[in-house]
Image: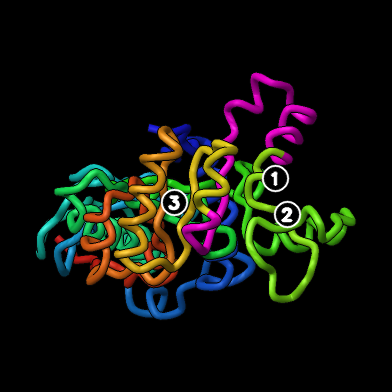
Amino acid sequence: MAREFPQIDWDDRLAADWRRLLAIAIEEDLGPDEPDDLTTAAVVPAGVPGQAAVVARRPGVVAGLPTVPITLAAIDPALEFRATVDDGHRVTSGSHVGLLTGPARAILAAERLVLNTLGRLSGIASLTADYVDAVADTEARIYDTRKTTPGWRRLEKYAVRCGGGWNHREALFAAVLIKDNHLALGAQAAGVPDARSFAEPNPLGEPHYTPAEAVRRAREYLVERFGQQRAEEIVVEIEVDTLAQLSAVLIAHPDIVLLDNMDTHTLSTAIETRNQLGAGVELEASGGVTLETVARIAATGVERISVGGLTHSAAQLDLGLDWL
């Protein structure tokens, strides 16, 4: 297994992320001053105690339970929550996820905040689990991307982990991922002459780093900036579009080569090429991956499959709040 991206588990950083988001969520739902729920204040007498269950309306995988106590404490410290399952647990329709107790008015004020958050994160975990199940008979691992909701990235990537997936790089600061625009623009800005610019013809006649040269430059930069030991911990990945680029870049030994939008026949050939020329370099398939195609992609032998849809296209898991 190649060098791996740091994986995200629930920690103080995620709790802090949620507290920042929660402040916005409370203001948009309950007002900018004291929390105010006009309907509940009009209908439910003050001081009435309540107990309610968070219930799954359909099967799925739960994620985000650590956000609930944070949410409740911000609404009313008298509210309590007891989870009846753990994050990553598969639930069936009708399953209880947790129990809320405390003032009934406060439970109603917190209801949508709790359900929206759990529904969003559990939806991501559930979709991820579907992808993981689809490739269970292969060696492929399912990875997320940076196609996340601004401000929610670590929370959404945590949900991917709850669903059995793996985290790709957390952010631009976390790893090197060289794409075609980096190759073209970086070479132009550096004044790379045409004579040394290509591993294959460039129809535009523009200066262009070869993939191998870009990998070498990235490693040199990391050593200069962070020192040898830290540089060796940072993943260097590069995207290629053709088998010719793959063959050319393997000599530079990147940690991972991303195979962009290749069909399954080309992916299988890429595996053969890597096995002949670049043992130890893992291959990642990306682009156009769906639940209908992911098993065929995994069967080619790629070690990694990245799926933007895990976070940008997941439907919420339907959860409700039922009084007990």
Q: Residue furthest top?
A: 229
Q: What residue sits right under mark 3 in the picture? A: 157
Side (left or right) of 33 relative to 67:
right
* Res 40 quadrant in image: bottom left
Residue situated in front as seen by the camera: 157 or 255: 255
Horizontal and vertical percent for residue 125?
A: 30, 56
Q: Secondary structure at mark 1?
A: helix
Mark 3–mark 2 Cα distance, whole angstroms, equals: 32 Å
Q: What residue sits right under mark 1 in the picture? A: 213
Q: Amino acid at mark 1?
A: Glu
Vertical position of residue 250 compared to residue 28: above or below: above
Vertical position of residue 21 compared to residue 237: above or below: below
Vertical position of residue 321 compared to residue 238: above or below: below
Residue 177 lies in magenta, yes or no? no
Residue situated in front as seen by the camera: 116 or 109: 116
Q: How crowded is the residue under tag 1: few (<14 C-alpha within 10 Å), some, or many (20+)?
A: some
Q: Amino acid at mark 3?
A: Lys
**Do we see residue 40 in this rendering?**
yes
Residue found 16% across the figure and 69% down from its top: 57
Query: Which of the two marks, 3 or 2, is nearer to us in this view?
Result: 2
Q: Are marks 1 and 2 in contact (CB under 8 Å)?
A: yes
* Res 307 quadrant in image: bottom left
Please report the bounds of the magenta region as a residue range.
217-245
